[in-house]
Image: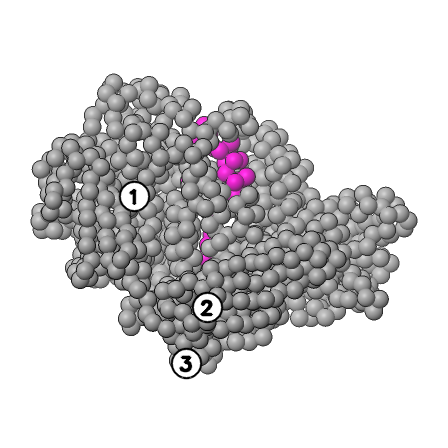
Amino acid sequence: MARRSVPLTLALGLTVTGLAPAALAGPGQQALAAQVSDQRPIYLDTAYSPQERAADLVSRMTLAEKASQMNSSVSPAIPRLGIAQYGWWNEALHGVAREQLVDNQNATVLNNTTSYPLSLSLGSTWDPALQYTEATAISDEAREVVKDNKFDLDFYSPTINLARDPRWGRTDESFSEDPLLTTKMANQFVNGMEGKTPEGKLPAAANGYYKTLTTIKHYAANNSEYNRLGGDSVMSDRDLREYYTKQFRDVIKDTQPGSIMSSYNKVNGVPAAASTYLIDNLARQTFGFQGYFTSDCDAIWTIQQRNGGRYPTWIPQGYDHVPNQYERHALASAAGEDLDCNTGYHDAWSYANTIPTAVAQKIKTQNDTFNENDVDLNVLRLFTARISLGEFDAETAVPWIQQARQRLAKGTWVNSDANDAVTQTPERLALARKVGAESIVLLENDTAANGSTLLPLKVPASGAYKVAVIGWYGNPPKDQTYLGGYSADFTAAGQRNIVSGYEGLKSAIEAMNPGATVDYLKGTESQRGALVPADVAATAGYDAVVVYVGNDHTDAAEDKDRTTLTLPGSQEALINQVAAVNPNTIVYMETIGQVNVESFKDKVPAMLWSSFNAQRRGEALADVVLGTVTPGAHLPFTWYRSEAQLPPIGDYDLHANATSQGRTYMYFTGTPTYPFGYGLSYTSFELSKLRLNKTSVDANDTIRVRAEVENTGATAGAQVAQLYVTTPDAPAAKQRPIKRLVAFEKVALAPGESTHVNFDVKVRDLAFYDEAAGKWVVDTGRYGFELASSATDVVQTRYVTVSGALDAVPSVVTAKPVVAGADEAADIAQRLVFPVGATVDPQLTVSLSDDRLFGYILKGRSTALPAGMTVKISSNRSNVVRVDSTDTIRAVKPGAATITAQVSYNGEKASGSFVVYVK
């Protein structure tokens, strides 16, 4: 099996006839291949790359067949080519939860698969390695339960939008408000799900196949639900690059995920689903993204249907009207939107039933006159993804299939209660518990007059000891337990594995002291009901009380933002009244994000917070409350005092101004309740000995930062050493962030143990985007490096002076090959199939490290390559596509060849490849 190559964003193909039925592994594909002949085609030959194979397969399809494969719900079978039905809309945000099984319907919710803590809880761990472990477990289970262990393996996860506003209805799906922390966590979600190493590479044991493919979403600037189906996220290009797309850029650079989902909203007036700027100029040409784009469900519909006139319509440049159903799909396809998630918010129109007509109508797009070659490139990227998962190859060659069947025999999984929650193994449940415990942030733990803290609870080994758990969320009915957005359904078998807060604490405390009593008190008449005075009064008689409060999808969710940060119902009053009668009150908040704690923060001695911690939440809470796990989590967001400190949620400006205090720790000028990165422990740590290896550097240097972390307490624990950078001398007019997180490391230490942490910081990573110059620049002058335990708890600062300018070197090389001369005249911007004898114009685009683009950018926007830049082109099959001494590319005979363009400039090289298919 050939390992997957690292291509550019397009492949071009050629037609080869015939199929060998025996080569189509798996009974489903064998049956579909009944009509094929005996000649082995390229797309079944593993000696070719996935891109070359996909090009061959696409070249065999009719236009109608190609269009049919561009619907996510579902892509139908094509029996004559041995192509099986495939569902693209699958979900695995915090456990495999949905599979696209039915045509033209939403994805089917799965039953009784393991539910892990949500992304915001993972962000609170500041532990990318733990995220990798969880994602690996999710992908194992995914391979076990999907159809034949080989189909429907593209998952619409993870969400990597930044949590810039806590009122956002999907805050729990995000990792953090910070681009770096989000990138580090998302990298390991992608790596674990896709079967890669933590370094982002497929191991030899994968035999060249991906385990699953992930979809980073929602691209871009999609952080408000009230206007998500067409609202306009307006911002500067600087904020777009420095903040709203930075995590997308860095995840692409670090680990190259399988796909990206475009968002519903417009960005600066243009729908994201049809934005050539976002999809092509930024993601592909500048960031180097090589996978496929999918729409949100159904973002292409929103181009035309602006939610009943609620949002302003988009009239593309050159149009005098709102695009109709054919135009909207042509505009999206030509921009690079490969897949139409065609259910959700939708009408009768999709890629499948509009693309052929759109091609026939020769619709004008921002890229070209819409034509079949645009479609070829869309479908090429989709089948490259499917081939890379092993769908078309012998099952014995795909290790992920074999491993899944060793764990769970093929055909034994059923999507009903009859599965007896078999995939919720003890190991996976234990992992859910571990992640949950590691995610709980200790916010308060006051020291009493006797010098002791309330947490961890000091449960005597014997004798009378009474603890109360109060609050509806502490012990909800199993069938009403909220596991977070995009969870599986839990029927009876799965519900048996849910452990509520009360159940977890009761079991653990009674195990420590069989004579102890742990009672549950509702506290309120219902989930949002009035207080029960008798329950509040009863808490006075307990040695300790855990007030368990929360919120759920009734307060905020996809399509619903919060309007207030106050706890819903009577829960705030419950906390205050319990604290008034029992001094040993512990508050645990399991919520979508931060809540307003100002009325009770100073009245309770101990407070804990996590986001939704899924099915083993009670065990996780007990581990922290009782000290089995020492808290080491830190807030991944700024905890504002109330919504009054925030601008309107639809305002995407980050900076403080006359009417706004700004957003996130990077720009917020107010005083929060708790800062970004904050978290207490049951032990104490000292951060010290901050050192830089240089005090003066050039803009192209790397700074080695070294510090020491020591556990100065009596308990083993973990600390997150955080490194921030400031620009203290920058003029206010430049609106530089107050500080930026540039590195962190979580270290576990025994009492008295110390260790060193080392960070290598590239000065170019400290650059800012200069809109006037159209490139990244490094400010000259002082930079402060802060060693801290939170954004405001700074221990030491050291300064370095930066001088000089960034060297611009090649970063990304992409291509849009066409037939030289002829295609430009025909307004064809890119091509899949070339005739024998054609001269291929690669239309190379070169992105420099400062984000400037040269070469072919878009129709009418070509820019000459910089003086001194050289290009060398080669072919891996010169008998199919020949490159002569002048770098002229010619299609010689039918077949597939990969063309590589190597660019040299300013002493550095970068290369990219594309596949030419000759017919």
Determine the CA span between mark 1 and mark 2.
Answer: 38 Å
Q: Secondary structure at mark 1?
A: loop
Q: Nearer the viewer, residue 835 or 578?
A: 835
Image height check: is 4 above or below 18? below
Q: Which residue is mark 1?
A: 7
Please state the extent of the stretch shown in magenta in the rendering: 135-161
* Residue lying at 32% horizontally and 70% vertically, measured from the top left: 805
Q: Secondary structure at mark 2?
A: loop
* Residue type (three-letter) at the residue carrying disc 1: Pro
**Coordinates of residue 697 in the picture (x, y in percent):** 40, 69
Q: Which residue is mark 2?
A: 694
- The quarter of the picture where residue 76 lies is top left
Q: Which residue is mark 3?
A: 731
* Residue lying at 73% horizontally and 60% vertically, measured from the top left: 713
Quick check: 566 left or right of 213?
right
Q: Residues within 10 Å of mark 1 (few under 14, many from 20)?
A: many
Q: Secondary structure at mark 3?
A: loop
